Image (cartoon, helix red, strand yellow):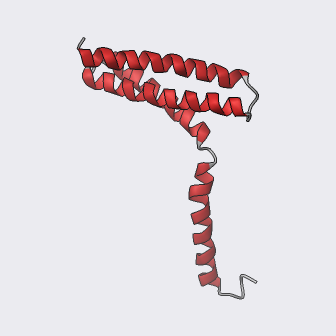
Amino acid sequence: MTLIEDLTLGTHVVAGFVALGGGLGAFVTAKGGRRHRRFGMAYVYAMAVVSGTSLALYALDPTSFRLFLSLVAVFSFYFAFSAVVRWLWPTVLGTPLLVYLGRRDRRRFGPAASQ
């Protein structure tokens, strides 16, 4: 292995242990509390590093086993990240959609229909 590969793998392993600790900490603390959120964010950031380094490792040595591990890491990060932004989708997508539909219906049915 090259020096770049060794450093990437070392970063990947350290971030994996941080993710394990953050996930365990979030699991054992009270949901919604300050500690839970901090452990959870540590988990999400560590999983972002794990996912990124797994893709880098795959790019450095593309084997089928590394492809499988990269896909596992990317999907794991997706699930971790989606837990953080689950409130974001209704807010970011839902609000403009409701405004658009409200304006569209007002134009279609006229001002009398909205009263």
The residue under the point 44% across, 24% down is 50
Residue at 61% over, 70% down: 99
Q: Residue at x 61, y 23 (%)?
A: 23
Q: Image quadrant of residue 52?
A: top left
74 left or right of 22? left
Q: Quadrant of the N terminus?
A: top left
Identify the image quadrant of residue 41: top right
Q: In this view, does 73 lie above or below 33?
A: above
**Looking at the image, which residue is at 40% across and 19% down?**
11
| Placement of 47 over or under 104, stated as above or below | above
Q: Percent x, y for residue 47?
A: 50, 27
In this rendering, the answer to whether 113 lies above or below 45 is: below
- How far across and how far down the image is residue 21, in percent? 59, 18
Q: Where is residue 83 in the image (x, y as percent from the top left)?
A: 61, 37
Residue 53 image offset from top left, x and y in percent: 37, 25
Q: In this view, does 112 lie to the left or right of 59?
A: right
Residue located farthest toward the top when viewing the structure as drawn:
1
